[in-house]
Amino acid sequence: MEKTIRLILGFTLLLLVSCTKDDSSTSIQEITTEELEVTLEEDILEVEPENITYQSEDKMMSTYRESEVDGVSWRNREITYNIEDENLSKEKLLSTRWIMDSTVNQYALLIFYSDDVFKIGTYQGGVDIQGNYRIENSRIYLSNYNSSEYMNQFINLDESETESEIDFRSNNVEFSNELLLNGIKFFPLGSEKQNGDNAVIQDIAVIVDKNVYVFNENVRFTTAPSLDSELININLYNEITEGQIRTNTFIRGTIINTIAKTDYSEEINDKSSPWYYVVITDGVEGFQYGWVYGAYFDPYIKENESIYLEELRNGMGLSSEDENASTGDELLQAARDGDLAEVERLLEAGADVNPQGDYGGTALMVAADHGHVEIVELLISAGADVNLQSDYGWTALMSKYGYTEIVEMLINAGADVNAQNDWGNTALMNAADGGQAEIAELLISEGADVNMQDDDGETALSIAADGGQAEIVEMLINAGAEVNVQNVYGDTALMKAAEWGHTEIVEMLKNAGAVE
């Protein structure tokens, strides 16, 4: 369908007269007009009169518009060159759209034009970087460029430099070719390798395998496909504590994307599997790549995602660095799972009753966190240290999940009710924070200090007042809690209660002598 558009121009248009392939020279025609009639037919713009070309509104069009096959138009470009050809040519640059590495910016394109102009930009936003290019000895040189502040944060072209270089490379594991500009990769759109294709990573022959998997066991993340290779640290998000847990092990339930696998299988612990090259999106480190042994994950099933998440929650901070788990590691797993029979078997087999995971979490802590009363009782009777602290100073008594019977059991076994973790938190503070009145009462009756302060100067009273825990506030006041203690920012329990509108607590505190 043909439709006519009237463009109202309040400025001077600079339009280049189109050139032919036989004549690369150009001329500039200046047109000053109030109206220019443009015909739009079948999504192709033609300007009247015919000897004037048009630059599209998305600004990624070439100044010239000759045909779809000469590399000038970017809209319908497809790869027309032999992707196995390792030589660089202008035809190769003009025969595709080059897309920026999606780990940096998913939609940015690098477009080369036959008039030796390059542009980097997006469909929606238009051009961010523009200049000239030339090819010499399989390298591309950029010059006369200008860059937007937005795109420069990714590519960082120094406009004071005469030229910048682009490397052309072949046999990328995800694409057949790539261009590398100041550390940023561009790939020819449409050259994505498919599952089953051959590639090379770290000089290791691999087979492309782009799939999603989920770990059914804890497994380490390494720099190379070997049990002896260096471990890679990653951060996993713990939804329960809303914190990052740093580990070098993928915890059971972690969902990952694989890129490729070795073209050989290795036998480890009576299992045979390739090693997989994987990518993860890490909230702290960005995108990270490394190797895992494939015998410890299964294909991802979306319907089971809630199960994976629960496994991940349960395993946070307790994963082993080595998939060849010792009996101590097995005890951690059995304690977490509530497998009483397995805990009994392992203890009888001589397992260490105080094994600690990556962050020092013990079997007793795991069982206490999950409310496994019988396992807690068994571990204590087997000699578990009730005051052993994790790497961050947590004890089994500091569990935030509130199992009164277990708290009582731990206290009777000699747990220190005033132990503090690395942030100065105590079991009483945690109970106040979680609204666990019965546990708070038990701890107070067993000698918990109601006026201890954490590293921020908070007390159990200020924490309870902040959270609106009226019953616990009253309990602490009756136990002798000081109502006018200030934290390091000068805030008191009264200020916190007033800020959140806890009027009942405000009155309690005032009646107890709190000063406004």
Image (cartoon, rainbow, N blue to C red):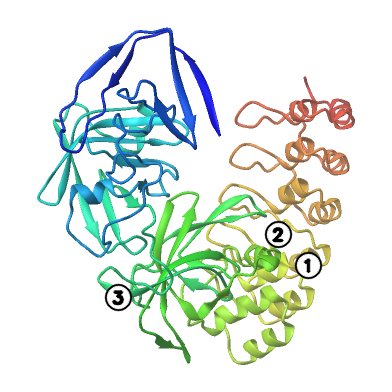
Three-letter amino acid code at disc 2?
Answer: Ser
In which quadrant of the rendered image does the N terminus lie? top right
Nearer-the-camera pick, 370 or 127: 127
Q: Earlier in the sequence, mark 3 or mark 1?
A: 3
Are there few (<14), some (14-19), or many (20+) residues within 10 Å of tag 3?
Answer: some
Q: Give the residue drawn at x 57%, y 74%.
A: 299
Question: Marks 2/3: CA distance?
Answer: 48 Å
Say whether residue 228 is visible: yes
Secondary structure under badge 2? loop
Nearer-the-camera pick, 233 or 8: 8
Are there few (<14), some (14-19), or many (20+) residues within 10 Å of tag 1?
Answer: many
Q: Say whether marks 2 and 3 touch (CB < 8 Å).
A: no
Q: Say whether marks 2 and 1 touch (CB < 8 Å).
A: yes
Nearer-the-camera pick, 316 or 483: 316
The circle drawn on residue 399 is 2
Are there few (<14), some (14-19), or many (20+) residues within 10 Å of tag 2?
Answer: many
Q: Which residue is mark 1?
A: 406
Question: Marks 3/1: CA distance?
Answer: 54 Å
Total marks shown come to: 3
